Image: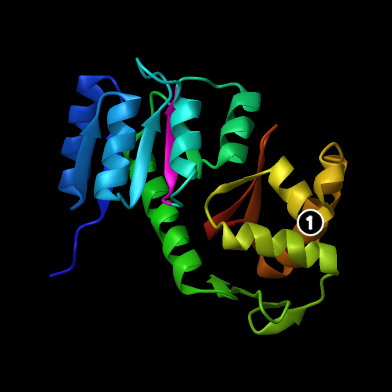
Amino acid sequence: MMNKVKILVIDDELSVRKLLRYVLEAEGYQVLEAGTGELGLMYNASHRPDIILLDLGLPDLEGQVVLQRIREWTNSPVLILTANKEDDEKVKLLDMGADDYLIKPFNMQELLARIRVALRHANRLENEIEPVIQIGDLKVDVGAHLVYVRDEEIKLTGTEFSFLALLSKNIGRVVTQNQLLNEIWGPGNTENTHYLRVYAAQLRKKVEVPLGKKLIYTEPGVGYRMLSEPAEKS
């Protein structure tokens, strides 16, 4: 029998933990609960969860501290649950190693979808070194630096390919402006956010137009997200 996916919920609100346990167990997940940051870190070390849902408003430790300590020794996906809608806060958490975030109150179906995306991404990183990523009629061959739409090769510049590959390897997740700028242009270019607008526009023209579907979404003030299922262009 296949082992159940273990989800660690770190949240100080008992009612939230109970609701999450009810919903997640109904989906077949195994759920661990922690009401404090210290207990969450202990469970993380002893139970090695597959994914962690982390609330920032903990009574003993700041959520950012818990995230930092988790990231010191594990790459398990961390999905932040927060009431803070500030873009700067979202960016900071993603740059610190969070995989995604949801603003409270959130829709449970969206939470489940984000969990599935995070788990797929973690499995892909574990199993593929140079992946070939298929997203509908789009194929991104990361190892060969080639892109195809319906088996027709799309010519991209090196920078355009790097942008597309980084988004495709993080399918469904937000890639922050800082992450993109650091990965593609290097640490000295983190202020040059206008680069991203230019290259996102180029990719929309070169990839989305022949695809006939919307693929790359802007998260205002935060970064970009590639859809796991391309949407029909309006």
Q: Is residue 85 above or below residue 79?
A: above
Q: Is residue 20 above or below residue 144?
A: above
What residue is shown at x 48% (from left), y 28% (from top)? Answer: 65
What is the magenta segment's predominant secondary structure?
A: strand
Relative to the observer, which residue lies in front, 38 or 178?
A: 38
Q: What is the x, y in percent for residue 228? A: 51, 59
Q: Where does the magenta region start and end?
A: 76-82
Which quadrant of the rendered structure holds the N terminus? bottom left
Q: What is the x, y in percent for residue 145? A: 73, 77
Q: Mark 1: which secondary structure?
A: helix
What residue is shown at x 51% (from left), y 40% (from top)? Answer: 98
Q: Is residue 135 above or below residue 115?
A: below
> Viewed as shown, does residue 111 lie left or right of 83?
left
The part of the image, by quadrant, that contains residue 131 is bottom right
Q: Which residue is the extreme one toward the top?
A: 59
- Res. 20 visible in picture: no
The part of the image, by quadrant, that contains residue 24 is top left
Give the colouring mode of the picture: rainbow
Q: Which residue is mark 1?
A: 184
**For mark 1, does the 10 Å Cα neighbourhood hold few (<14), some (14 to 19), or many (20 or more) residues?**
some
Q: Which residue is the extreme one toward the bottom?
A: 151
> Viewed as shown, does residue 1 lie left or right of 156?
left
What residue is shown at x 86% (from left), y 47% (from top)? Answer: 195
In reply to whether residue 145 is colored magenta, the answer given is: no
> Viewed as shown, does residue 141 lie left or right of 129?
right
What residue is shown at x 43% (from left), y 40% (from top)? Answer: 70
